[in-house]
Image (cartoon, grey):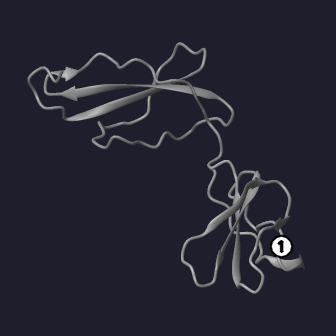
Amino acid sequence: SDGGNEISGYVIERREKNSLRWIRINKKPVYDLRIKSSGLREGCEYEYRVYAENAAGLSLPSDPSPLIKAEDPVFQPSPPSRPKIMDHTRSHITIGWTKPLFDGGGPIIGYTVEYKLTSETDWSTAIQSLRGTEYTVMGLTSGAEYVFRVRSVNKI
């Protein structure tokens, strides 16, 4: 409840796991529903709580959030190298590639191999979460032209 007055902003506090001390993380009330929490120690767990503020003052704090572990941010990895044909028959092809130059800040946990006929727009997934850098796609139509692509996957 806003107590009859419009909410003018929010105050956010955090504390480390097992600590008794809450630390305010914003000097002025914020209006956005997101805020950057800086000065965290990597590997430590933190919980957060929020107060609403209006002309009458601050509300009681919200219940604390679940604990959140501070970790380096992870981004999408760059693509692996262009797939190369390693082997083929009339109905299958083995392609290989090298790992991406940038892992996104987290280890590569696998690759997704997709393919399509050159005349089509929709891609088919041959395999997901492949650990290696080579894969054989089977059941292809002899004489048809295909395009293949490989995506790197990290924990993001």
Crowding near pointer 1: few (<14 within 10 Å), some, many (20+)?
Answer: some
Q: Is residue 110 visible?
A: yes
**Amino acid at circle 1:** His
- Seen in the picture, residue 121 relative to 23 is either above or below; the reply is below
* Residue drawn at 77 percent across, 74 percent down: 81
Give the secondary structure at mark 1: loop
Residue with the mark numbered 1: 92
**Relative to residue 1, is residue 15 drawn left or right?**
right
Please identify the residue farthest to the left as the structure is shown. Answer: 4
Residue 6 in percent (x, y) is at 13, 32
Front residue of this view, candidates 108 and 8: 108
Q: Is residue 63 left or right of residue 107?
A: left
Looking at the image, residue 101 lies above or below residue 87: above
Residue under the image location 85 percent in, 64 percent down: 133
Whether residue 108 is visible = no
Tell me which corner region of the image, top left, top right, bottom left or bottom right, holds residue 57: top left
Tell which of 122 and 33 is nearer to you.
122
